[in-house]
Image: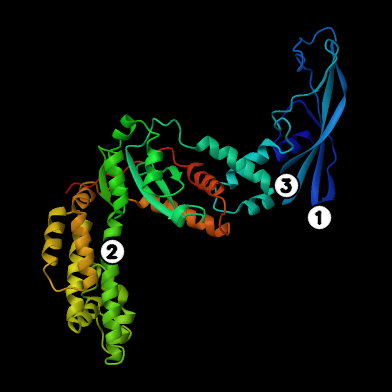
Amino acid sequence: MNNILEATLQIKDKNIIWDNNVQEKILKNRKSLFYSATYTHKPEFCAVCGCVSQNNNIVKNGTKTSRITLCSVSGLPAYLNLRNQRFLCRECGSSFTADTSRIVEKYCHISKRLKNEIKAKISETVSETYIAKETNVSIHTVRRIIDDTARLLTIKPLHDLPEHLCFDEFKSVKSSDSNMSFIICDSTTHKLVDVVRDRKSYSLKQYFYRFEPKTRLKVKTISIDMYLPYIQLIKEMFLNAKIIIDPFHIVQALNRELNRTRVRIMNQHRYKNPKLYRKLKHYWKLILKNPNELQNYKYNRYKLFESFITSKGIVDYILENNPSLKNDYEVVHSPRECIQDRDYIEFKETIEAATQLDLSPGLKRVLKTLMTYLPYIQNTCEYPTRTKGPIEGINNKIKVLKRNAYGFRNYYYFRNRIILITKMFGPKQKGIKQQLVA
C-alpha cells in the first residue's frame, strides 16, 4: 500500500508512515481526497540549541497535524493530513517539529510538487485565475509564485549583453506612456532579454546606462523596424553596432501602398465598370503575390472570367486595364525581389530610378523613406539571417496571453508573466542557419 501511495503522490520519503485508508470528503463545495500519514525520524541534534542527540536528551513529544495541499489525483483535489512528530530537548527545554523540507517548505502548506506544477503552468499563455482553479489554490498564491520565479529570471549581471539584439514594442497597460512598452530579444538564441516600461528615448537611455560602456561596445548588430528614435538611440548607446532594418517591414510598406492604389482605382470603377471593379476586389491577393510564383501555363476556370485563364493572365488583364496601377505594380515588385535576393546595389538603383516615375503619392512617400534608410538596408542585405522574426514571435505570445487573461492593469504583473512565458523551458542553444553558397 505504501508503494502505491508513494508512486501515485510522488512523495518518496522513508520517514513517512502511510495510513491504509483514503477518505472522500466535501471541501469548498468540491469532492476531495484526503490522505493521512505520520512523519517521524530520529533527530541528530536540537533545532533550537544545537546540542547533539545522545543519552535520550531529545525525546518524542506528541505530534502536530497539518493539512498539505497536493497535486490533483484523478481530477479531484487532494490533501495530506500529515501528523508531524514533535520533539522535546531536555537540555534547553525547547520543543521543535521534524524537518519536512523534502515535502513542503517551512511555514507553508502547499507541497513543493504542487508549486512546481504551478511554475509549469505559468509558463503557458493562460490566466492566473485559470491556473489557481486548476491547482486548487488561491490566485494570490499563484501571483506570489510568479513574482518569486520571475525575480530569478530577470537579467543579471548587468555586465552581459548578447552580441546580436532585436528591438521592438508592444501594446502594454494603460499606465505606461503611450500604452507601449519596449522589448529586447537575442536574435541568435531567440530568448527574451528584458522588458522596459515604455519606449521613450529618455527611459531607454536610463535603462541602457546601467550597462558598462565596454558591454555595450560588444553588441555587433541590432535589428529594428523603420523607427527613427531607435536609430538615434543605437547611435548614441551602441557605437559598434550595425543597424539592420527588418526586411518584412520594407516589403510591408511597399505592399500597403500598392494595395491602397488598388482600392482607390477599384472605387473609381465601382459604377463605371462593375465587372472590372469586382475583379479588382476579388483578386487582390494575386496582385500582391510574387510575379515569379504566378502560374503561366496552367489554365483553370476562375470566378468572374468566362474562359479558362492562368493566374498570371488575370494579373495581366487587370494591369492592362489600369495603367496607373501597372506602374505602381512594377515599381513595388522590383525592390521586393531585390530584398529577397539580398541584392543591395540593384535595390538602390531601382529605388533611385523609381523616384523619377509617375507614381501614386503614397508610393512616392514610401520610396523617399526607403532612400533615407538606404545605409541600414545595406546591412539588411549583408546580414540575411538577422531579422526581427524571433521578437515578432514573442510579441504574438504576449498578445495571446493578454487576450486569455482579459487584459492586465498592473505593469509589473504583466512583465513577470512575459518573462515567464518566454524564459522558462526555453531552448538551450539555437544556432543561425548558414547561407548556401552558389
Mark nearer the N terminus (2 vs 3):
3
Q: Is residue 406 above or below residue 311?
A: above
Badge 1 crowding class, 10 Å Cα cut-off, few under 14, some 14 to 19, many 20 or more, is few
Q: Which residue bears the numbered disc 1? A: 29
Q: What kind of residue is marked 2?
A: Ala
Does the image show residue 62? yes
Does the image show residue 185? no
Q: Residue 372: percent from the left, percent from the top?
A: 20, 56
Of residues 384 and 373, the one drawn nearer to the viewer in this rendering: 373
Taking the spot 43% from the left edge, 54% from the top edge, the residue there is 170
Badge 2 crowding class, 10 Å Cα cut-off, few under 14, some 14 to 19, many 20 or more, is some
State the residue lying farthest toward the bottom.
272
Give the Cα separation between the discs numbered 1 and 3.
17 Å
Q: Quadrant of residue 105?
A: top right
Give the Cα separation between the discs numbered 2 and 3.
54 Å
Q: What kind of residue is marked 3?
A: Val
Mark nearer the N terminus (2 vs 1):
1
Q: What kind of residue is marked 1?
A: Asn
Q: Is residue 159 left or right of residue 111?
A: left
Q: Which residue bears the numbered disc 3? A: 73
